[in-house]
Amino acid sequence: MATAKKPTAKQDPVGAVADRSPDGADGIRHVKEFVVLGAAPAEDASEPDPNKIATLQEAIQRGLHPRGDVRLDGCEEQPDGVSRLLRYSVEVVPAEADEAPERTRTPRQALASGD
């Protein structure tokens, strides 16, 4: 009796990326968490949010092509009462399966638009 083989990265690029991503992916979203001191960043800040830029950069480093804007999905106070866990996510497409790579949202584009 033959056992089923696990699909290779070429056959299942989304599964392969999720397997190696410690922050993981939520469906087709790359999720990145940061632990910071103080309050959550203001939504209407005049300066770009460095955590959003870092989320884009990490997604690209993991072989994903970000699409659209990074969003702040949550802010949780940590047990120490001082720090907060910030959860960011961005819609992604595995680079290997991307049929429109020109739509990739880069950190440079985010900085230029003031995200």
Image: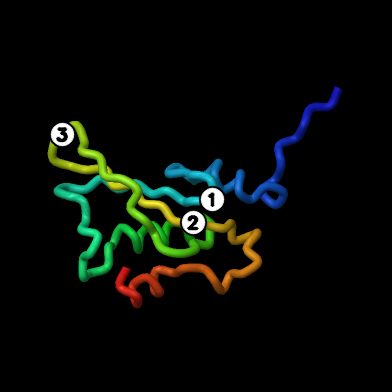
Q: Which of marks 3 and 1 precedes in the sequence?
A: 1
Q: Which residue is mark 1?
A: 28
Quadrant in the rendering for residue 82? top left
Q: Is disc 3 surrounded by few (<14), some (14 to 19) or many (20+) residues within 10 Å?
A: few
Which quadrant is home to the N terminus? top right
Quadrant in the rendering for residue 107? bottom left
Residue 61 location in percent, x, y? 48, 59
Residue that protrudes farthest toward the bottom in the picture = 112
Residue that protrudes farthest toward the right in the picture = 1
Q: Is disc 1 surrounded by few (<14), some (14 to 19) or many (20+) residues within 10 Å?
A: some
Residue 34 location in percent, x, y? 30, 48
Query: For the residues marked 1 and 3, what is the alpha-carbon distance in whole angstroms?
Result: 32 Å
Q: Secondary structure at mark 1?
A: loop
- Identify residue type, mark 3: Asp
Q: Which residue is mark 3?
A: 80
Q: Nearer the viewer, residue 60 or 87?
A: 87
- Identify residue type, mark 1: Ile
Q: Which of marks 2 and 1 precedes in the sequence?
A: 1
Residue 25 location in percent, x, y? 49, 46
Q: Is residue 49 above or below residue 84?
A: below
Q: Which residue is mark 2?
A: 91
Q: Which of marks 2 and 3 precedes in the sequence?
A: 3
| Residue at (75% x, 35% y) in the render | 5
- Identify residue type, mark 2: Glu
Q: Secondary structure at mark 3?
A: loop
Task: Answer whether labels 1 and 2 touch (C-beta < 8 Å).
Answer: yes
